[in-house]
Image (cartoon, rainbow, N blue to C red):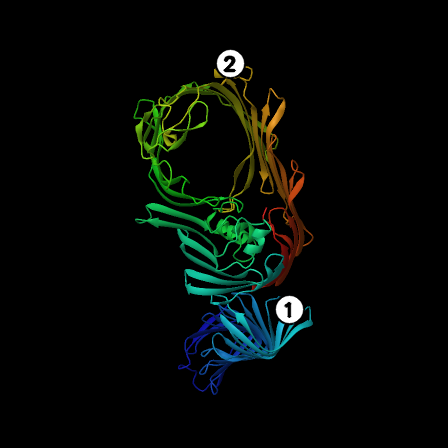
Amino acid sequence: MAILVLCLTAVFAGVETQAWAQSELIRVNAQGPVDIRADYVEYDERTLAYSARGEVEIKRGAVSIYADKVRLDSQTLVAEAEGRVRMVTVEHVMTGDRMAIDLQASTGKIYNGIVFVKANHYYLNGEEIEKTGRDTFKLRNGFFTTCDGSDPDWKFTGKELDVTLDGYGRAEDSTFRFMDVPLIWLPKVIFPAKFKRQSGLLAPMMGMSDRDGFVYNQPYFLTLGEDQDATITLNMMTKRGVDLGLEYRYNRREESKGMVMFDFMPEDGMASELHEKGEIESPYNTRYWFRMKSDGTMFDDLITVKTDIDLVSDVDFLKEFNQGHSGYSSSLNRFSEWFGRDLDPRTSTIRTSKVNFARSWTNTSFNGTFYYYDNLLTDNKRTLQELPYLSYTATRQALGETGLYFWMKSYYRYYYRENGATGNVADLSPSVSLPLNFNDYLTLEPRFTYSPRLYAVTADDWDRELSSGAIKKITEDPDHNKTGISQDWKFQTLASTYLFRVFDFGSAEDPFKIKHAMRPNVTYTFRPNQEDEEEDMATLARRNITLTNQVAYGINNTFTSKVMGKNETTGDIEPIYQEFLRIAINHSFDLARYRGGNDPVYDRNRYWGAVTGRLEFEPSDYIYVEADTSWNLYDNRFTRINAEVSLEDKRGDSITLDYRNTYDRVNQLRAELKVAINQEWSVSYINHKDFKEEFDFEETYEVAYEGQCWGIKAMVTDSHFRDSGFWLVFSLGGFGDIFGYGQMNSSTN
């Protein structure tokens, strides 16, 4: 392909028109380089214009024009295009029958055209579209949508539309049409055309509740900068009053982010009535809930800081206000998504707040945490706080060339409360071991751990007697100090061997192997009985360690597959290993019980421990099975059965079963089923059943449609602990949820 570079100041003498052969790429200097390619191109020296026909492509910087026919004025940079016209820029794509565009001023007109905005998948369609600036458009007899195709599912139509990208659109004589059915007519309407974060109203949510009356939830989004924003929410309830919600977020980087949420209800209009009915604990007046989580660093990222705060006005607040933008469920989901850390269960009467400082070195680590526990059932004066809880850990490491290994755990707690015993407790736990290997057939490792406790605490005026567990009065002086040290040590011997076999199920062309590895193990543990010397020793410092003299044994099995596959990063064919099955079985024999004689602490008839098993099965990304059990040999029954099964496919179908059984205490199953009817429609069912109490914790039905540019979700739920009722949410592509309505019956169980 020939390439010809021309300058308009250098022309051929006596030549008024110059033509180029088919498909030649021509670079001209028209106030900067412009590339032209077409089946036929000619230059008219008198008009200083280029004319191109047949598969025309003109490119100037990041702007490209494609058409059947284009005329480009090299002086004004006005391009006139006809036939299958398409102009592509970094921000958008314009198509139409014909176009006149000023490439220098970025203005012009397109007829029977469409503007596609890439950032937010917006379409502007009109008989005549005038580009009045870089990001501004005026449409005549047009519409706006986010749907693909010539016949969109929804659109805002108008005789005249003015649209500013990353701003707002304004339409006159506008109709919102859904499935080509006019639903809403407005003489004037303003709609967002944003693809960057900007301040403005978010979609409202409305509903009905037997306790709250009619509920209107209106959030307002406020941009505070590139890395921070806030949402102010007005919750209006005809029966309860007004709840003001504030959510502040910042995200400077993955290691430095935070979210703060605060809800404040100046006066609860239903509290007295609900209290008289016995449905809440007290006739509350002012109510609130403050919660926050943050991740950060200090001293050039040497120390990580994690904060979790959860303070609520009363024991009933989270039970009553579960739904909505600032309800418990929404807060829990956002915290979990942002930080991977959850809130305490909404039914928990003790709310935990903490601030953690952590620093790691090559072989050691430090953690310092300030815990504050808020007991909602009391005045919190006797609640024991840990201010702080410090730990210093040294990982397993060799002691020179001695063959010995050392590791250590150490803890310090300062216990504080307004009424009751307080004080300092420190635990040290250094360990040393000597690993021995006998020709790779047997590994033997004796271990010794010494665990002293140092304490300086005050005895409470009421404490618990060591032997009987009865409460007795120790001293009239709650400031009576107790200081000292208590001793503890533990000796262990670990023995194991390693066996494996590889099974070949494939061929030389298609290899497939499975490795079965077994590790039988035996552990002997001895820990002497260490009763505290002083019977009236303060409770905070006491640790009553009973005799441990036990032999535990088991076998761990792993199954690993090997196939040849393509490395997704490099594209090379290489071995792919997957440990798809793990099975562990363990048992123990208690020598202390066996030799217990007539000591009532030890029942010598029950010296065999429970048989425990654990299984994990994960053959692919679509199948996961996990189970653990405990079998009592004497009662001939399972004392624990926990199992989780998760199955899904590429269509989007999934089923999850989570079963929990603890003998005579818990017998529950949670099942979640989702069926993808097609690419857009799905139905879901959730059931959480308690077999012991014979009732359903929760039963939820959901139907959802997720199309390319709109969605709708309908949910009906019947819950013992959550609000029951129905909920309907409608969403539009590019806008998210724009409307929600529900009717709920509250539960405070």
Up-down: is 82 above or below 591? below
Q: In which quarter of the image is residue 10?
A: bottom left
Image depth: mark 1 or mark 2 in front:
2
Q: Which amino acid does label 1 sit on?
A: Trp
- Residue 107 in picture, x, y percent from top left: 49, 79
List the residue tagged with mark 1: 154
Q: In which quarter of the image is residue 169?
A: bottom right
- Residue 636 in picture, x, y percent from top left: 63, 22
Could you tell me if residue 701 is visible in this image? yes
Task: Determine whether, in the image, residue 370 is placed left or right of residue 631.
Answer: left
- Gap in Å between the C-alphas at discs 1 and 2? 78 Å
The residue lying toward the viewer, choosing from 170 and 75, is 170
Up-down: is 576 above or below 71? above
Up-down: is 364 above or below 706? above
Q: Which amino acid does label 2 sit on?
A: Tyr
- Residue 147 in picture, x, y percent from top left: 61, 66
Q: Which of marks 1 and 2 is nearer the N terminus?
A: 1
The residue lying toward the viewer, choosing from 466 and 498, is 466
List the residue tagged with mark 2: 594
Q: Residue furthest front?
A: 476
Task: Determine whether, in the image, residue 461 is placed left or right of residue 122.
Answer: left
SS for dot 1: strand
SS for dot 2: helix
